[in-house]
Amino acid sequence: MPSHQHILVIRLSAMGDVAMTVPVLQALVQQYPKVKITIVTKPQFKPFFKTITNVSVYEVDTRGTHKGIFGLWKLSRSLKKLQIDAVADLHNVLRSNFLKLFLSITPTVQIDKGRQAKKDLVNGRVFEQLKTTHERYVEVFEQLGFPLELNASHTLPKATLSSEHLDVIGRDSKPWIGIAPFAAFDGKTYPIDLMTEVIKELSKTYKILLFGAKGNESETLQEIADEFDNVINLAGVFSFENELDIIANLDLMISMDSGNAHLAAMYGVQVITIWGVTHPFAGFMPFNHDTDSAVMADKSQFPKIPTSIYGNKLPEGYNLAMRSITPKAIISKVSHFLK
């Protein structure tokens, strides 16, 4: 085993990318129990790591104390006091590169994001499965001298739900399906009228729990919840940590190519992902899932898919890509996994 026993892990954002570190760190501490991990990330992501042995979170404030070059220098001064002896940069952006420079710790390994391969995928030069983000994370630790076996056992345990949760959700025995119908970009968001058809049909058999943000998303979800039995809007009802506890207890999650898919997967929940102008080949499938659990837009109708890695580019006419996925296709996937 390498001599370095305290590894600093850098992964500042976004939520889905931070969630994807969870099974990898779980595997690391299980297979190398003497290793200590400090992960530098945003405060809101701290609950992800609360049950992982030997992992502590150093909260970074990128909009305040740790903002800008001077803020990163101050962060490096604080981190040096922790007696770090190796750095795993799972972010590899300008901010993390400056932080590594200030830390001056050896060995330091940064993730290879495969930027050229992803450009080739988007430009249509190749159409094949690229390395997954989980595989890229694993490669970083392998280069530090910690080869990892990553499998389904490296998910987080289910949380015990409180009476506060159950008073809202109910105590009947119907299986729970979470639905997170929103994403950062329109090209990754299944049209709400079609998702309403999915919810209407599934609510006849299952308890449907709707996830989203406060404000407009919550208002839209509440309108849907008011329309059907067995549908509950959870947007803005609980704290993020309490919401995670509910996600951990789902029987299935339906999500866009978004952070919610990765939140459910880190608890071992079966996820059905819906893909519009992005594609699983870019490497962002949820942990321990394959394309059998994905529902994708029709590439024969929309041949430029994926139009971008993150879904932020929408060529003319591609606003209709999601409409090539029928509600029936999604419902059929649910039936397949919840037999």
Image (tube, helix red, strand yellow):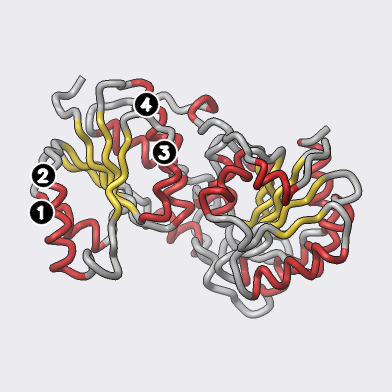
The structure residue drawn at horizontal position 30% and vertical position 44%, both measured from the top left corner, is: 39
Residue receiving disc 2:
81
Reading the image, the residue beneath label 3 is 50
Mark 4 or mark 3: whose residue is earlier in sequence: 3
Quarter-wise, where is residue 248 in the image? top right
Q: Mark 4 and mark 2 in contact (Cβ < 8 Å)? A: no
Q: Which mark is residue 296?
A: none
Q: Earlier in the sequence, mark 3 or mark 2?
A: 3
Cα distance in 3D space between marks 3 and 2: 22 Å
Q: Residue at x 77, y 59 (%)?
A: 325
Q: Are marks 4 and 1 in contact (CB under 8 Å)?
A: no
User: Which of the two residues, 188 or 37, is positioned nearer the viewer here?
Assistant: 37
As rendered, which of 28 and 209 lies closer to the eye? 209
Q: Residues within 10 Å of mark 4 (few under 14, many from 20)?
A: some
| Quadrant where the image shows the C terminus | top right
Q: How many marks?
A: 4
Q: Name the kind of residue labelled 1 in the image.
A: Arg
Q: Which residue is mark 1?
A: 77
Q: What whole-number distance in Å separates the C-alpha atoms at marks 3 and 1?
A: 25 Å
Identify which amino acid the numbered label 4 is placed on: Leu
